Image (tube, grey):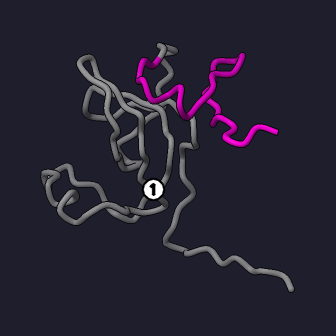
């Protein structure tokens, strides 16, 4: 028997993959993607806390980031419309990166193999 996967026409393909280095379009922070939700998957309270004039649509990918700004490191949840690729080449310092990613020879973040052979 063959399984058939039908795609929801409302879902878009995520622009950024795991390990992508991104920065926020408005706010001064950047980070590396460690998970992606195809559509908004946080609390309504979280969404309503965003000022209405900058509140993102829910029908787009949302990214979990190991994020940092000039003062701190944290986890951020950001809509695709508010992210752009970070092409600065600057190293990220977030302490959680080493737990999730390896940096390959080309300088890209690759998800660590959690089950070595």
In x, y percent, where is residue 66? 41, 34
The residue nearer to you, when weighing 70 against 6, is 70
Is 84 in the magenta? no
The part of the chain drawn in magenta is 92-117
Residue 26 relative to residue 63: left or right: left
Magenta part, dominant SS:
loop
Query: In percent of the image, x 36 and y 50: which residue is there?
Result: 79
Is 114 in the magenta? yes
Query: In percent of the image, x 31 and y 33: which residue is there?
Result: 74
Badge 1 local density, few (<14 within 10 Å), some, or many (20+)? Answer: many
Q: In which image quadrant can residue 41 be found?
A: bottom left
In x, y percent, where is residue 58? 34, 63
Label 1, secondary structure: give it. Answer: loop
In x, y percent, where is residue 116? 76, 37
* Residue wearing tag 1: 61
Query: In percent of the image, x 13 and y 51: which residue is there?
Result: 51
Q: In which image quadrant can residue 43 be found?
A: bottom left
Name, please, the residue furthest toward the top. Answer: 90
In x, y percent, where is residue 64? 42, 45
- Check the picture and name the quadrant holding the C terminus: top right
Name, please, the residue furthest toward the bottom. Answer: 1
Vertical placement of 52 versus 103: above or below? below
């Amino acid at each position: 028997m063959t399984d058939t996967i039908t795609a929801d026409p409302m879902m878009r393909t995520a622009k950024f993959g795991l390990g992508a280095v991104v920065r926020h379009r408005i706010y001064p922070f950047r980070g590396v993607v460690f998970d992606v939700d195809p559509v908004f998957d946080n609390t309504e309270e979280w969404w309503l806390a965003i000022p209405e004039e900058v509140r993102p649509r829910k029908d787009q990918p949302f990214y979990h980031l190991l994020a940092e700004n000039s003062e701190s490191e944290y986890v951020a949840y950001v809509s695709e419309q508010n992210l752009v690729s970070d092409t600065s080449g600057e190293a990220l310092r977030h302490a959680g990166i080493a737990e999730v990613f390896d940096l390959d020879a080309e300088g890209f973040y690759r998800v660590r193999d959690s089950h070595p052979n």
